[in-house]
Amino acid sequence: MKIYLLAPLLLVLAQTRAQKAYKAADAFAKTITAADLKTHLTIIAGAEMEGRETATPGQKKAAVYIENYFKTLGLQPGNGSSYQQYYPVYRDSFLAAEVSINGQALALNTDFTPALASPIGSLGFGEVVYVNFEDSAWKNGKVDVQGKLVLFRFQGLSGAGANAGFGNTVGVRINGLMAKGAAAALVVQDIFPLTKPFERLTNMRTNKLLNRQSMAYFNISPAWAKGILGNDWEAATEGKLPSKVYKAEVQTTYNKQRLVLESSNVLALLPGTDKADEYLVITGHYDHIGRQGDVINFGADDDGSGTVSVLELAEAFAKAKAAGKGPRRSIVFMTVSGEEKGLWGSEYYANHPVYPLEKTTANLNIDMVGRLDSLHIKRGVSKYVYVVGDDKLSSDLTPISVFANKKTKLELDPKYNDPKDRERIYFRSDHYNFAKNGVPIIFYFNGVHPDYHRPTDTVDKIEFEVMSQRAQLVFYTAWDMVNRDAMLKRDIPLPASAMGR
Ligand SMILES: [Zn+2]
């Protein structure tokens, strides 16, 4: 009975305490509006930005827009005299490839394609080892492929092999052959001639030199395989041909070029007052997955929504500073790139921190806050946000978050804090690069939806009202973190299970 009476009373008291604590903050929180968010997002997720793929012109246009906005707010450059923190990105570009069998040249696209991972160079072989991965001789290690050219059929994409399971990919086969010392491979594919030219660029990467090289391999058409195997070809197509050596003169050459590209994080600094050498870092990734041909993946929710939330938070705190209510700690507003490629930008920042990570009180990361997920639509709840990671690293995080939410009254959903959650959300956005270095983090997220990583993730589907409330929650949380007396405690070690990706 007592508790029954006390609970509403405590709630009222907490509300009053929040009213007081955030009295100065309210005027600036109000500058985070649905209309402003929409104005920015319409540009960031517009066609001109081409889906903002890392190291492309679209990403660079977005970077310029963000930098210019930071300048108009009067924020300082976040990286010395620059608003950009550049990092290199590498990818290989195809130059030339040749394959000849018994003196006859194969035609690119019609008869063969190179694997772009192949090393540069020329090779020549006087015989070919046909490998049947299902026969007992291979399984018992009786087939000698050391230093040899191997030929095998690949049916992972069609035909009988379609149901053979995830492990049945060319890469797995090539790795298996490399482990046995094979020098090169011809992979017989059913797909020739190609209906469109093969992709001439490898995936991007951040390491200039590879730790491990692939062996050379080339996809060839069944007609040319038949030329080597002769009458045995029929048995090979039925999977009945045992591994066996064939006489054939095969010569290959491959050449490629390493391209050095560039991407960047865009960051601005709002200096603090009496605790200016301590920092709060607020992040959102501005890159997305770009376009396929003419089809643009706009990335309005992912993560245009987080990017423009960072812009609006920057504006709110800049106005507070102009009004003499600036933060005690410095705030770094940082939109990062390379997230969709593997959290590259935030990893680069964590490895090259502009501000010491041990002086960084927390990272608040915003990635997808403009939509509703089916779980909440089903329950008829729109005023919610997933709060991720507040149970780790610092016992200060949850109370600060809950207290800030007295102002915004969202349902704070802790679902993704469950260590058994299979989505492994904690590892999947930029806060992780702060967390693994011991910096307490909170990650704000709306959950996934059917438009995730599709061209249909567009501005017209954004729920700007709830998005502005979510951004305001981040604002009140940040306000507390930058103005309290002490930096956040680091009193909860990250469990081992949260360290490996
Ligand atoms: Zn994202």
Image (cartoon, rainbow, N blue to C red):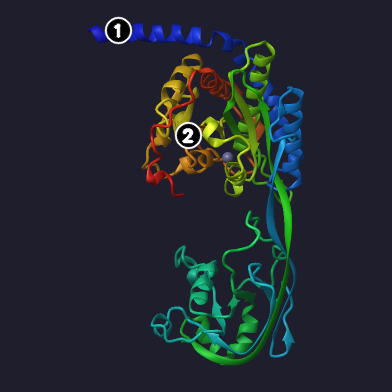
Q: Position of residue 246 (x, y in %)?
A: 57, 91
Residue 403's quadrant in the figure? top left
Instruction: State the image quarter where residue 221 is shown.
Output: bottom right
Q: Position of residue 149 (x, y in %)?
A: 58, 83
Q: Nearer the viewer, residue 151 or 203?
A: 203
Query: From the image, which quarter does the N terminus lie in?
Result: top left
Looking at the rendered structure, the kind of residue marked 2 is Ser
Looking at the image, tell me whether mark 2 or mark 1 is earlier in sequence order.
1
Q: Which mark is residue 6?
A: 1
Number of residue marks: 2
SS of the residue at dot 2? helix
For the residues labelled 2 and 1, the Cα–Cα distance comes to 36 Å
- Horizontal and vertical percent position of residue 100: 71, 84
Residue under pointer 2 = 374
Instruction: Judge by depth and name the residue closer to the eye, 493 or 302.
Output: 493
Side of 167 where 250 appears, left or right:
right
Q: Secondary structure at mark 1?
A: helix
The residue depicted at 41 percent of the width and 21 percent of the height is: 399
